[in-house]
Image (tube, helix red, strand yellow):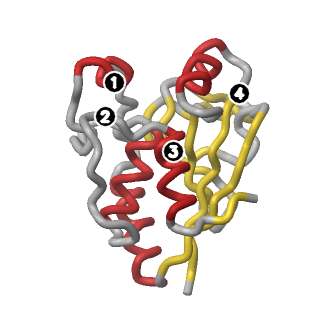
């Protein structure tokens, strides 16, 4: 057996505060790679040690942002599922952040469209693609960090 690890977090910015207030305490999700680096979709540009990490789906170094709250969820899976999960996530590198996603909460949008992502959509789609979870039934663009945390805990993911 193997596992995929997610880092749910929030920081002390106005946007993060609003998302986490609406969404049970978290505003962002990254996948923690075996190297310790983090893969996820963000709407901002991150600079670490004079290196620029653009917005969108990117791999960023651990500690790229000072988070005020973090929680890790480890989900058991087969080696084949983990490979499929990582392959799918890496195939999404460079895709833009879905800046219209917040409006999708109100007006609806198909969150499975692969043209752009928010962090929790990317994580959920990767779990589905790898066969770690069955296809989720949720209305358009309802995969929030809090909804993903609920899915992860239902899978037996142990927060630590």
Q: Quadrant of residue 143?
A: top left
Decide: is 120 above or below 90.
above
Q: Report x, y in % for residue 157.
A: 60, 65
Query: Is 132 left or right of 12, judged from the image as shown?
Result: left
What residue is pinned by disc 3?
40
Q: Nearer the viewer, residue 23 or 30?
A: 23
- The residue identified by callout 2 is 141
* Lower position in the chain sequence, tag 1 or tag 2: 1
Identify whether 116 is placed above or below 91: above
Residue at the spot x=75%, y=33% of the render?
A: 67
Residue 154 in picture, x, y percent from top left: 51, 62
Q: Do residues under tags 4 and 3 come within 8 Å of each other at their CB atoms?
A: no
In the rendered image, which residue does mark 1 sit on? 105
Q: Earlier in the sequence, mark 2 or mark 3?
A: 3
Foreground disc of the pair 1, 3: 1
- Measured in 3D between alpha carbons, the distance from the residue under mark 4 to the one under mark 1, in whole angstroms, is 21 Å
Q: Which mark is residue 11?
A: 4
Determine whether, in the image, residue 36 is placed left or right of residue 24.
Answer: right
Q: Secondary structure at mark 1?
A: helix
Between the C-alphas of marks 4 and 3, the distance is: 15 Å
Residue 68: give x, y in percent of width and height. 78, 31
Which numbered disc, 1 or 3, marks the residue that appears first in the sequence? 3
């Amino acid at each position: 057996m193997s596992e995929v690890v997610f880092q749910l977090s929030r920081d002390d910015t106005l946007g993060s505060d609003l998302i986490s207030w609406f969404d049970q305490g978290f505003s962002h999700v990254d996948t923690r790679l075996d190297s310790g680096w983090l893969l996820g979709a963000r709407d901002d540009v991150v600079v670490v040690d004079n290196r620029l990490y653009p917005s969108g789906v990117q791999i960023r170094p651990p500690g790229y942002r000072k988070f005020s709250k973090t929680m890790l969820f480890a989900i058991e899976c087969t080696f084949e599922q983990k490979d499929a999960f990582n392959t799918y996530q890496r195939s999404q590198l460079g895709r833009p952040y879905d800046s219209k996603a917040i409006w999708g909460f109100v007006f609806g949008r198909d969150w499975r469209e692969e043209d752009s992502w928010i962090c929790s959509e990317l994580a959920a789609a990767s779990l589905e693609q790898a066969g770690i979870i069955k296809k989720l039934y949720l209305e358009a663009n309802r995969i929030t960090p809090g909804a993903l945390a609920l899915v992860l805990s239902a899978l037996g993911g142990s927060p630590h």
